[in-house]
Amino acid sequence: MNALEVTDRSDKPVGTQADGSRLPSLTGLRFVAAFLVFCFHLSISGLSAPGSTQHAFARAAGAGAVGVSFFFVLSGFVLTWSARPGDTARAFWRRRAAKIYPNYVVAFVISVVGLYATGHAVGFLVGAANLGLVQAWWPDPGIYFGANSVSWSLACEAFFYALFPALLPLLNRIRPRRLWASATLCVAAVFAVPVVATLLPAERHYWFVYIFPPVRLLEFVLGILMALVVKSGRWPRIPVWSVTVLLVAAYALTPYFPPDAETSAVTVIPFALLIPAAAVADARGKRSVWRSRSAVWLGEISFAFYLVHQSVIVDLMRGLDAQGSAPATAWTLAVGALAVSVALAGLMHRFVEVPMMRRFGRRRARP
């Protein structure tokens, strides 16, 4: 396979293998990760019941930001799993743009309208950086969190997509017996990132560890390597339930680690094991709650949900002055934020994402 012979077959649901077998559990798990991020943003917004209940919720949701790490590992895994010869890098980029950018722009407009409606302007630099998908390269929170704050992760994804046509052939050269060693080195690099961050000024630690695209590339590469492990036949058939237990334990322990380590390092090993375990289980036709029709639908709208949920929460906070509301009212608003986010995501998926993928995301037949 040369540097141009890659395809993500983006016209099919995420988790579709090149031979046609589907991996619906990976689609269903996408919403779980997006929901963790939603709960995290809900907990830090104050849009939840005050008192001991809020404290318990905030503690449980405090590590929800690790859901982004799941997306990065999953992205590398799925693109590699479905890669096949006979396509060009340009076609790959076109389909990725058709998949990502229309929803991204709609979510950006929603966030800008919400900000203006509540008396907050969006500067030219922030707007240009967001639309250009480069905001994560600025170490200024006013820029990488400007406008739609969750969109910084799409700047990382755009960086990954730009490199993928060159990365995959390069990593494909690794001998199968060395794939696990390579994945271990990649995990070690993820754990080394917080140590390297100590060499930077304190105000740059968070940006370097959590936002900076080359650092987050490590998780994407790890996903590629895990897909190659499975494709090479060297996956040891680790059961999904055992990895799930490991992930829950790691998630529960995350708040006890230093802030620079808790954003991705603590859960990166469980994520790197859960994704291939679920993929292999699906390929073998094993039952899974994440394969149900409702779970798969939620997974299909998870990208749009991820893009709009923070704007919905922020608009409710600013527009309804929910801070300090009575518990019943606060929980009502929290459930309302979830319902509105799901509804908006469903509309965006149906009327933006699907039509654009049908128009620009399909592979074009060659003469």
Image (tube, grey):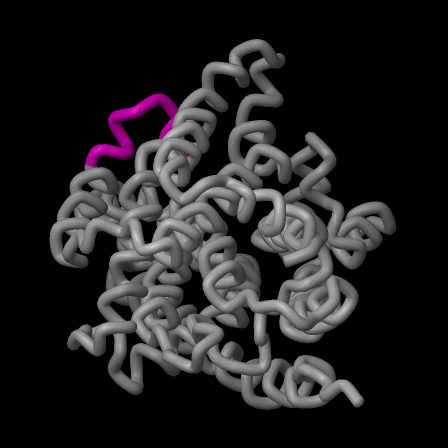
Residue for point 13% across, 57% down:
241
As drawn, 341 above or below 352: above
Depth order, front residue of 191/32: 191
Residue 259: say if magenta: yes
Name the chief secondary structure element in magenta.
helix
Can residue 113 be seen in this snapshot? no
User: Disc count in the image?
Assistant: 0
Depth order, front residue of 68/256: 68
Residue for point 87% across, 50% down:
124
Q: x and y percent of residue 99 in the render?
A: 64, 73
Task: Answer left or right for 365 relative to 249.
Answer: right
Of all residues, the one furthest to the top in this rendering is 199
Residue for point 17% across, 43% down:
246
Q: x and y percent of residue 245 in the render?
A: 14, 48
Residue 277 picture quarter: bottom left
Q: Which residues are magenta?
A: 253-263
Depth order, front residue of 177/41: 177
Task: Answer left or right for 257 relative to 311.
Answer: left
Q: x and y percent of residue 336 in the render?
A: 38, 73
Depth order, front residue of 141/228: 228
Task: Answer left or right for 300 relative to 254.
Answer: right
Task: Answer left or right for 203 relative to 89.
Answer: left
Which quadrant, please, contains the C terminus?
bottom right
As drawn, 154 above or below 114: above
Q: x and y percent of residue 180 in the render?
A: 35, 38
Can residue 359 be seen in this snapshot? yes
Residue for point 64% across, 64% down:
6
Residue 59 picture quarter: top left
Of all residues, the one furthest to the right in this rendering is 124
Residue 268 picture quarter: top left
Which quadrant, please, contains the N terminus?
bottom right
Residue 319: say if magenta: no
